Amino acid sequence: MQKNLLALSVFLLVQISAKAQKWEYGYGLHYQSPQGSMANNINGATGVSFQAGYHLPVLKNKLSVNTDFGSGRYGKQRVEQTFQSDAVQTPTNFMVNYINFANYAHLNLRYEIVSKGIVIPYVQMIGGRQTLGTRVRINEYDEGFGGDGCEPLENDVTFRKRTMVWGYGGGVLVNLTSNKQRRCSENDILINFSVSQIRGGSMDYVNVKQLEQVQSTPEPDETGKAFTIPFININTNNIHNHTVARVYNSPLQQLQFKLGVIFRLEQ
């Protein structure tokens, strides 16, 4: 994701430099706060974003379309897990790393309520795709860990799910370019702050908000399903599965906060 984002950024910057009229690009930070039932199981995601857009020659150039790409994390934990098998009396202990990521690719349609002046309020519509995932890495070579000959067949597994999203919101642009600078240059520099409500389809995700020792069977009040990794007993060659996390399903609901800078290249 990061390599693709960098390549796309370079490509768009080259295109913007070649055709500067009415183009803009920007970088920023974002925070995605889960809402609804999803808020019970995952934390908010912080990350970075890149956007590039064009002012459409309609409505006095108040309407613009932007592509917006973001990559972030909603948690990173390292937990000692005990994997018990019925075939052995001595359990196996490993440290397990959980890296939880949230990526998105959006298309934003922005309408600036006021196009002139230092402060420019706007409203926007959003559509695109959201990804939630967790990378699970079992540190089987940590000193002092291990067990009765039980080892993972895969010690680095990624759980990833995607859904289409839509949303709406508003924000404000603050122009940092003085009137004197505008007369000498075609470029504007603006601070961008926005808040958007994002909605999407139901999706699976790993519960990592209060991650503790994973049980092979859920508690009576739990509704999630097991996320397992295959293990092998090197003494008997018996292949079996151990639960490393629990997977839940919820409709995607989140508030997205963004703060960044936009470079506007126009006449």
Image (spheres, grey):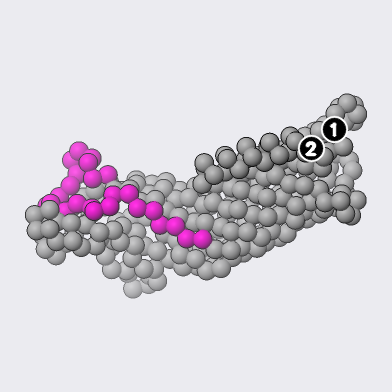
**Residue appearing at x 56%, y 57% in the figure:** 130
State the image coordinates of residue 226 (x, y, percent, origin top left): 33, 65
**Residue appearing at x 39%, y 68% in the figure:** 224
Q: Nearer the viewer, residue 40 or 123?
A: 123
Residue type, label 2: Ala
Relative height, residue 264 to residue 243 (above, below): above
The residue that disc 2 covers is 20
Left or right of 3 on screen, residue 141:
left
Residue type, label 1: Glu
Q: Earlier in the sequence, mark 1 or mark 2?
A: 2
Residue 43 visible in this rendered orientation of the protein: yes
Q: Nearer the viewer, residue 178 or 209?
A: 178
Quadrant where the image shows the C terminus: top right
Relative height, residue 41 to residue 139 (above, below): below
Left or right of 2 on screen, residue 183:
right
Give the numbered dot on residue 186: 1
Left or right of 210 on screen, residue 162:
right
Q: Nearer the viewer, residue 65 or 33?
A: 65
Q: Secondary structure at mark 1?
A: loop
- Where are the magenta residues, as a range? 139-162
State the image coordinates of residue 221 (x, y, percent, origin top left): 37, 72
Q: CA distance from mark 1 to mark 2?
A: 9 Å
Q: Say if the magenta span includes residue 151.
A: yes
Tag 1 and tag 2, C-beta contact below 8 Å: yes
State the image coordinates of residue 172 (x, y, percent, origin top left): 77, 47
Disc count in the image? 2
